């Protein structure tokens, strides 16, 4: 039996109305099949805990993963303040769900908690021939522990283990995010869906950014806090950069300027990762979504809209090629909120760019605070200002 994916979306005001509308759309694409897994990506204006409990009541045997968002989308388009829903009925893939209602400050313990129910890693499943392990990970996008958990998970699994996911959002309020499963949802949580497939899934990732400033050195940092760059308060590099561009920071919304001009970490001449500054501290330190190591070489990076949209096509082509000739049954898409802010009214074109490569494939996803993509071809795993595409094969 082939894998079947279907999506639904809603902007209804009430939790009950939004869920029912989205479920009706998605269930129509499932026929008589009962989905194995469901995803709920919902604006923080909805009570996520109530959403997942209602979803479980509707589909009692379906496993759910859910996250609050900074925007939602399906193949039908983009919403802000709504929800997107995705149902998946597998052919042969087996799965298990892990949930940590509090992420805490110990990434080792967090990963152990998320993997406690990972029945897909047992020798029995290996003997059954299900040789392609996948973990889909959702976590608090405002917590620096999320990136460290990705690193720890990467360290503890096999080389062929694919990891993908994203950090939950809160419509850029930058206060708190929620993650849940069918067991419920809480603020500051993490959840993982572990899968064991007989055929490979695939991911694609791209950002479309390039250096826009001189190279600088991080001279004092701890975790996701960058205190000094080139021996000066970190925010001073943004003041100097803005002045060179003729921008008066007193006259522009600072959060928007920061997400449109992020911090790129360099390795030799390559831009290896991007970190989004989320806020400026009282002493000029930058609070970033993700760790920036002390001693790192950095620059400020920007992306032009057409290049950013081309990057979405690049990520989609990577995912398509990673399926090794198989057709896609569906796509999960995690797109950084910074891309949303940079593209503005053009942001819905990102879904269109992905559909240029996957024209008839259902998809669902959300604007995120940090993206996760790790496969055997990549050494890192946690990203900012990127679009991550997870392609689910039809014969999974």
Image (cartoon, helix red, strand yellow):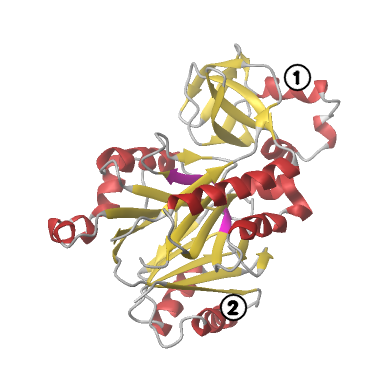
Task: Give the mark nearer the N terminus: 2 vs 1.
Answer: 2
In the image, 27 versus 331, the foreground residue is 331
Is 372 magenta? The answer is: yes
Please identify the quarter of the rendering in which residue 11 is found: bottom right
Viewer can see residue 60: yes
In the figure, is residue 355 to the left or right of 396? right
For marks 2 and 1, give the CA distance. Answer: 46 Å
Which structural element holds mark 1?
A: helix
- Residue 348, image x, y percentages: 71, 58
Q: Which mark is residue 240?
A: 1
Viewer can see residue 46: no
According to the picture, the residue beneath numbered tag 2 turns out to be: 18
Quadrant of the image containing the N terminus: bottom left
Q: Residue at x 64, y 50 (%)?
A: 172
- Residue 299, image x, y percentages: 63, 23
Q: Residue at x 30, y 66 (%)?
A: 93
Residue segment shown in magenta = 366-373
Which structural element holds mark 2?
A: helix
- Residue 371, image x, y percentages: 50, 46
Q: Residue at x 17, y 63 (%)?
A: 128
- Residue 145, image x, y percentages: 41, 41
Q: Residue at x 31, y 43 (%)?
A: 153
In the figure, is residue 118 to the left or right of 127? right
């Amino acid at each position: 039996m082939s894998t079947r994916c279907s999506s639904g979306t809603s902007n209804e005001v009430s939790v009950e109305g939004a869920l029912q509308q989205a479920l009706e759309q998605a269930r129509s694409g499932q026929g008589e099949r009962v989905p194995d897994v469901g995803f709920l990506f919902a604006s923080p204006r909805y009570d996520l805990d109530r959403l997942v409990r209602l979803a479980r009541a509707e589909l009692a045997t379906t496993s759910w993963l859910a996250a609050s968002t900074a925007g939602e989308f399906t193949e039908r388009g983009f919403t802000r303040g709504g929800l997107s829903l995705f149902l998946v009925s597998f052919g042969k893939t087996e799965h298990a769900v892990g949930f940590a209602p509090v992420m805490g400050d110990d990434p080792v313990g967090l990963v152990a908690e998320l993997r406690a129910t990972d029945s897909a890693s047992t020798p029995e499943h290996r003997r059954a021939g299900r040789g392609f392990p996948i973990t889909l990970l959702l976590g608090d996008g405002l917590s620096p522990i999320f990136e460290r958990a990705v690193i720890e998970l990467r360290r503890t699994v096999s080389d062929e283990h694919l990891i993908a996911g994203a950090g939950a959002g809160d419509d850029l309020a930058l206060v708190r995010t929620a993650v849940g499963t069918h067991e419920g949802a809480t603020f500051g949580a993490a959840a993982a869906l572990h899968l064991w497939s007989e055929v490979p899934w695939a991911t694609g990732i791209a950002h479309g950014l390039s250096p826009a400033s001189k190279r600088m050195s991080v001279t004092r940092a701890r975790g996701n806090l960058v205190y000094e760059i080139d021996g000066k308060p970190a925010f001073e590099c943004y003041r100097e950069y803005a002045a060179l561009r003729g921008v008066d920071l007193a006259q522009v919304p600072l959060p928007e300027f920061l997400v449109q001009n992020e911090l790129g970490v360099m390795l030799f001449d390559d831009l290896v990762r991007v970190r989004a500054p989320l806020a400026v501290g009282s002493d000029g330190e930058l609070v970033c979504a993700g760790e920036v190591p002390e001693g790192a070489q950095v620059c400020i990076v920007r992306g032009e809209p057409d290049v950013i949209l081309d990057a979405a096509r690049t990520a989609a082509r990577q995912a398509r090629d990673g399926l090794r000739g198989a057709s896609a049954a569906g796509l999960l898409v995690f797109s950084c909120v910074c891309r949303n802010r940079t593209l503005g009214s053009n942001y819905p074109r990102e879904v269109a760019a992905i559909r240029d490569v996957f024209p008839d494939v259902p998809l669902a996803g959300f604007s995120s605070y940090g993206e996760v993509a790790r496969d055997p071809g990549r050494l890192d795993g946690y990203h900012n200002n990127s679009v991550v595409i997870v392609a689910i094969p039809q014969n999974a």
